[in-house]
Image (tube, grey):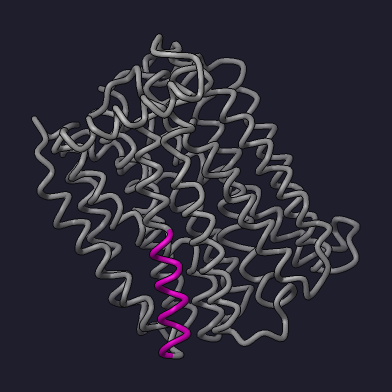
Amino acid sequence: MKKWMSRPVISWAMYDWGNSAFATTVVAAFFPIFYKKYWSAGLEATESTFYLGTTMSIAALLFAMVAPFLGSIGDIKGWQKRGLVAFALFGACCCGLFFFIPQGQWQGALLVYGLSWLGFTGGNLFYDSLLVSVTDSKHYNVVSGLGYGLGYLGGGLLVVVNAMMVTQPAMFGLESPAEGVRWAFLSVGVWWLVFTIPLIIYVREVKATPNGQDALSGVREVLKTLSKVRENKAIFIFLIAYFFYIDGVHTIYKMAVDFALSIGMESSDLIKAIVLVQFVGFPATIAMSYLAHKIGTRKGIFLGLFVYCLVCSVGAFIQTPTHFFILATALGLVQGGVQALSRSLFGQMIPHEHAAEYYGFYNMFGKFSAVLGPFLVGLTSLMFHSPRLSLLAILVLFIIGMVLLAKVPLEKEHS
């Protein structure tokens, strides 16, 4: 218990508590709604969906191109914490910029959204790599799960407050729901930065590697690591599998609200569903991590992906808010677990002294996949005028990912 409930572990996990507010309040809840009904009012629903999906694809592509190099610099310089803080500060400041974007300026809103997402994902690259600094491989599952679990709880608590700011603005001295949304975005930046402080104080970085101290050394290390990744069959196949299935996970998370709005659901029901996912996800992620500790990490991932396949298959035919709540609950049961166990399994496979660099590739594959998913949803919706068909298209990504994951040659089933 002491090994995985230490002060560094809790401090590391509290960063997830803080930055998950961006994932809940901004990505999952209010940006899609505010973008649809305030910033892009007047655009056709399919057109605004296409622009949103394209923006996310471009941001993902830009980050994927630089992720390994960022990780390499973090390893060479021993700058994992500094990299995390720099990206967190940038992302949090971008959240504050939403406050100043006037109605109808959908281009500016999408630009700031893409930049804030880069801050979020950049911070997560270094955050993931610090997992190997705060605990040993035996406890990766439960510690990784603790981070995601606290992320659900922290993000859930703030999104409840933010929802009250929007639905009952007078309680907070605000004049309108629109003003409540703007202040909600600002509160995310503050929340994110405050809960970064414990990590800064108590988490130690992996020592800098002695291979060089300049940018050229970083390029050489990335090329060397890329060669090692290609030669290591287990890591290579896992990353390809991860590319496909995490694409489906991220796409559903990012586009769920837009999908629901496009088929005529009310904003109030969507906010309730998002809050439900957060508070289901907190205990479910930790429980799924403990289950994987018993049955094996890969089997735990398979369990979660099977649920995703069911959600995609059934979700295309939902008709009522009750249906949406049921599917949201199912996602809450496995969403955090799939991500936590994927991070844990990869951590068990890589050399710890190059953790940031390897996690750079891990994030690169994850973000390159995010180029395909949102664009696929937007393009399918635009071509066939049916958001439901775009949801069925995502099912293929999960199936490919599961088939490849089954082929990963692990020495033993990690638990």
- Residue 117 vs residue 206: left or right? right
The answer to whether any part of residue 279 appears in the image is: yes
The residue drawn where x is 51% and y is 77% is 260
Q: Residue 172: horizontal and vertical position, in percent?
A: 85, 55
The residue furthest bottom is 385
Front residue (pair 95, 210): 210
Q: Residue 11: horizontal and vertical position, in percent?
A: 54, 23
Q: Residue 94: horizontal and vertical position, in percent?
A: 71, 48
The residue drawn where x is 40% and y is 42% is 363
Secondary structure, magenta segment, majority class: helix
- Vertical comparison of 348 with 95: above or below: above
Q: Report the quarter where the N terminus lies.
A: top left
The answer to whether any part of residue 7 appears in the image is: no
Front residue (pair 122, 270): 122
- Residue 165 vs residue 4: left or right? right
- Vertical comparison of 171 with 41: above or below: above
Asked whether residue 198 is drawn in magenta, I would say no
Q: How many marks?
A: 0
- Vertical comparison of 232 with 81: above or below: below
Residue extent of the magenta highlight: 371-384
Front residue (pair 124, 225): 225
The residue drawn where x is 56% and y is 38% is 17
Q: Residue 129: horizontal and vertical position, in percent?
A: 42, 28
Asked whether residue 382 is drawn in magenta, I would say yes
- Residue 399 vs residue 379: left or right? left
Front residue (pair 14, 215): 215
The residue drawn where x is 68% and y is 40% is 90
Q: Report the quarter where the C terminus lies.
A: top left
Quarter assignment of residue 356 = top left
